[in-house]
Image: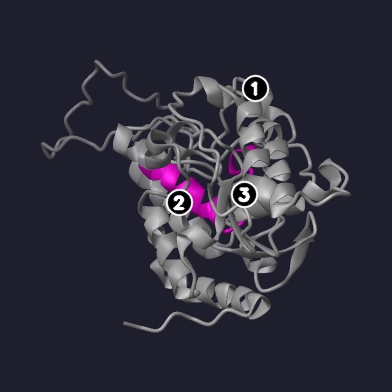
Amino acid sequence: MSLTSQENLQHLRAYVDYLRDLGIYDLYRRENPETFLPETVREAFAASAKRMVAAPQTAAKPPAQPEARTVPRSAPPVSPPSVTQRAPMAASGTRPQEPVRPAPPQPPAATYFDSEPAPLPPELAAPMPKPVSFDQLAPLPTQIIPAAERVAALEAIRADIGDCTRCPLAYGGRHKIVFADGDPNARLMFVGEGPGADEDASGLPFVGKAGQLLNNMIRAMGLQREEVYIANIVKCRPPGNRTPEPIEANTCSPFLLRQIDIVRPQVIVALGGTAATYLLGVKQSLSSLRGRWYSTRGAKVAVTYHPAFLLRDPRQKGEAWKDLQMVMVELGLKPAAKA
């Protein structure tokens, strides 16, 4: 596909992120999306692609063939007049009708779904590795770090990260490493996907528009941001806010695993499909993951929509609130009184 402008590129990126939030992955790996996308998503995707790709020219319909006439055997064969030769005038003064030559056959107009996909680079053409849950990455800790020592333990992890150059995100225009924010002794932890532009500039997770919505969600649960712990799967901003690649998430996940083992939250809320994929080691749609409890590193895990997705589709805020209410029951929290 050839994009017509930078705005179209941003539109396509936002739409792909929307599909991934719905649990649809590896869109670029399928030769025929029509075979696995739901009809409503397929129609929306086709309409979006039609706006961004130059519409192909419709093949001209060949004119109808003239009805063949039977020539008597006694009559000599009649050859059609050449292009430069004029047909003789009839006695009545009218020119006899020249036989119509059919137009050369043209290929049918290509559509998005039956067009041949462009070849992929080797690193993208390779099958995506199967995700591994945090419980399988390392043995569970045998010792609990005392509450008074957790700040120093987390600072040691930050020092270990340093000016990280372990994965390609270090060379994608990163400004600051976004470690975490909140209470090292929190009972509730939120894990997102990765930093955005505002987070990359400030060095703190969830401080942009999505962060403001997350703050509202936390307050609605009867808590303050300072009472929870917030982190991401990756600690560097992916270029263009794209979804982290497996090599990036797998490189950064061990640091998040160590953070979880130090904080030891009672409940972890996975914000979005990417967080759920790497925390739990499963790759399913959010609709199939929501509404149930999971476990990782000794904590209960609930899955809900990412605040950035809720900004794109506010209709799902009610569903996200149901997920948070499940967490509130587990932690014994009461919703904040409405002002």
The local crowd at label 3, few if under 14, some if 14 to 19, many if 20 or more residues have their Cα within 10 Å, is many
Q: Which quarter of the rendering shows the C terminus?
A: bottom left
Ranked by sequence position, the earlier of labels 3 and 2 is 2
Which residue, as the protein is rendered here, is positioned at the far top? 84
Secondary structure found at label 1: loop
Secondary structure found at label 2: helix
Residue 165's quadrant in the figure?
Answer: top right
> Which region shows up in magenta?
11-29
Ranked by sequence position, the earlier of labels 2 and 1 is 2
Q: Is residue 211 left or right of residue 269?
A: left
Secondary structure found at label 3: helix
Residue 60 visible in the picture: no
| C-alpha span from label 3 to label 2 | 25 Å
Amino acid under disc 2? Ala
| C-alpha span from label 2 to label 1 | 38 Å
Which residue is under mark 3? Answer: 274
Residue 264 — which label? Answer: none
Which residue is under mark 2? Answer: 46
Residue 214 placement (x, y as % from top left)? 45, 61
Which residue, as the protein is rendered here, is positioned at the far left? 93
Q: In this view, does 197 lie above or below 17?
A: above
Amino acid under disc 1? Arg
The local crowd at label 1, few if under 14, some if 14 to 19, many if 20 or more residues have their Cα within 10 Å, is few
Residue 238 placement (x, y as % from top left)? 50, 33
Which residue is under mark 1? Answer: 166
- Marks 3, 1: nearer the viewer: 1
- Marks 2, 1: nearer the viewer: 1
